[in-house]
Image (tube, rainbow, N blue to C red):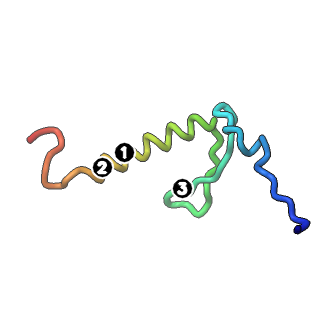
Amino acid sequence: MSGVTVTGETAKKRAAPDPKEIVCHKEPVIGSLFPKEICARREDIADRQRVDQKTVRDSQALRPWKDPAGD
């Protein structure tokens, strides 16, 4: 028998993060060498990521030879 004991994750790690918690991270700025620090609630960051991803998917799906507004 070895002296190593394996334990599960702590309760804090298992619990979902609070969506109202304010977190800060750095984002690159186009045309600048210095990143900008962004602080926002977790739920706002998640909403922004969803919108940004949808925008990218929509613009990648457009075909340059067809007008998306008409046929």
The local secondary structure at tag 2 comes to helix
Q: Residues within 10 Å of mark 1 (few under 14, many from 20)?
A: few
Measure the alpha-carbon separation of dots 3 and 1.
Answer: 19 Å
The quarter in which the C terminus is drawn is: top left
Q: Which residue is mark 2?
A: 59
Which residue type does callout 3 highlight? Val
Which label number is shown at residue 55?
Answer: 1
Q: Quadrant of residue 55?
A: top left
The quarter in which the N terminus is drawn is: bottom right
Number of the front mark, 3 or 1: 1
Q: Which residue is mark 3?
A: 29
Residue 47 percent location from the top left of the image: 50, 37
Measure the alpha-carbon separation of dots 2 and 1.
Answer: 6 Å
The local secondary structure at tag 1 comes to helix
The reply to whether dot 2 and dot 1 touch (C-beta < 8 Å) is yes
In the image, residue 1 above or below residue 28 = below
Residue 30 percent location from the top left of the image: 49, 58
Measure the alpha-carbon separation of dots 3 and 2.
Answer: 21 Å
Q: Residues within 10 Å of mark 2 (few under 14, many from 20)?
A: few
Q: Is residue 6 left or right of residue 65?
A: right
Q: Quadrant of residue 5?
A: bottom right
